[in-house]
Amino acid sequence: MGEWKEKPLCELVDIGSSKRIFYKEYVPVGVPFYRSKEVIEKHNGKAISTELHISIEKYDDIKKKFGVPVEGDMLLTSVGTLGIPYIVQKDEKFYFKDGNLTWFRNFNENLLNQFLYYWIISPVGKGELDMVSIGSTQPALTIIGLKSIDINLPPLPEQKAIASVLSSLDDKIDLLHRQNKTLEALAETLFRQWFVEEAQEDWEPVKIGDLVKTNMSSITKDATLKTIRYLDTGSLTEGRIEGFQEIDITDAPSRARRIVKHNDVLISTVRPNQKHYGIIKYPEEDIIVSTGFCVITCEKINPHIIYIFLTTEKMTEYLHSIAEGSTSTYPSLKPSDIERLEFKLPPKERLEAFSVFADNAWNKIEYNYIQIRTLEKLRDTLLPKMMSGEVRVEYEGVLQSERTGQ
């Protein structure tokens, strides 16, 4: 297998930025315009939350004179949240903000863009970026600093083999996430059809508080409880848990109070429009969550029904609209706000049929999340070892398949 060689990054790829676009040049409809925020969302596979545009005429003029991002180019966040890469996909059409993002293009034959992508997010790459970043209150990566980096490269076939291993893991993770989104979307569609569009006048109106209990139990700093698994609102977004904090009870923040059990529903009471919600699937142990959550225990109804009811787009907007707050404080819900919400209770047969569908869907979703966590752990274990050369990837087979066209 070939030896790794250290080479200046600036000799392997052109490093630059965009032409300046002014605020007054934004238009309501046109070609998408990305800042660091949008590139981070693209990197994470999320939809763009804030849509900005420049005119088609402006884009075409820049494309003719200076060029625009094309398939295979890479953007790197360079102000604030540093070092988040994104590789431009086929048929993408957009422009981006100078200063916020650095543009890597015209990769030469010795550097694979995917290898650079994984190198940047590895501990090796992050360490190099940290060394060339400037500023303390607002850290930044400069073009000059990035050009000064040396990168230790394996031969191109080995780069391809490394990227293939890591990207196959990422592709599987992405597929599982998309399956989960599809399952939740199907459940929400069925809920809307059965419980909203086909609702009957004679269905009994009830309040959520008639069917659930909120914030049933809390902990104190009891000496008999040594450690807790803690979840705050920032670590739970749109049903996905980013990670628990294992905390000694004596070091736990004062807001670590709410006890959550299997099938409890969590709704953030602080800034409820930001979609910090989920349904807990950990039957083997209790979870402790921030007092920024309302913990909903469903005693008389399937929890997935309450979960979907509270997390539709319209309900999210409504909860935000009734949250208390002012210009100087965050809008905040009270548990009583949720308990007072009215719900037309369908017949028992329909509730049971939907419960069976939803239980099966969320069993699959949770199974997928278990697989996701396993694959992410494997990827995160392999990534630093591959990027440092500690783990080598056999690549002669890659070369053979390229020669034979297989």
Image (cartoon, helix red, strand yellow):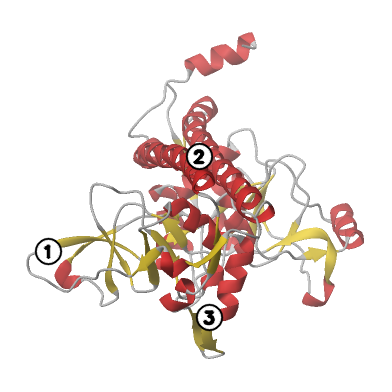
Element assignment for label 1 = loop
Crowding near the residue tagged with mark 2, few <14, some 14–19, many ≥20 C-alpha atoms within 10 Å: some
> Residue drawn at (65%, 41%), measured in percent from left and top?
107
C-alpha gap between disc 1 and disc 2: 37 Å
Element assignment for label 3 = loop
> Residue drawn at (44%, 57%), measured in percent from left and top?
278
Q: Earlier in the sequence, mark 2 or mark 3?
A: 3
Q: Residue 2's spot in the image, x, y percent? A: 44, 24
Towards the viewer: 58 or 183: 183
Q: Amino acid at mark 2?
A: Phe
Compared with residue 169, is residue 193 higher up or lower down, i.e. above or below? below
Q: Amino acid at mark 1?
A: Leu
Crowding near the residue tagged with mark 3, few <14, some 14–19, many ≥20 C-alpha atoms within 10 Å: some
Q: Which residue is mark 3?
A: 323
Q: Amino acid at mark 3?
A: Ala
Query: Which quarter of the rendering shows the N terminus?
Result: top left
Towards the viewer: 65 or 256: 256
Does residue 225 appear to the left or right of 104 in the view shown?
A: left
Residue 157 visible at all: yes
Does residue 176 appear to the left or right of 51 in the view shown?
A: left
Towards the viewer: 360 or 313: 360
- Labels 2 and 3 touching (C-beta < 8 A): no
Q: Residue 281's spot in the image, x, y percent? A: 35, 49
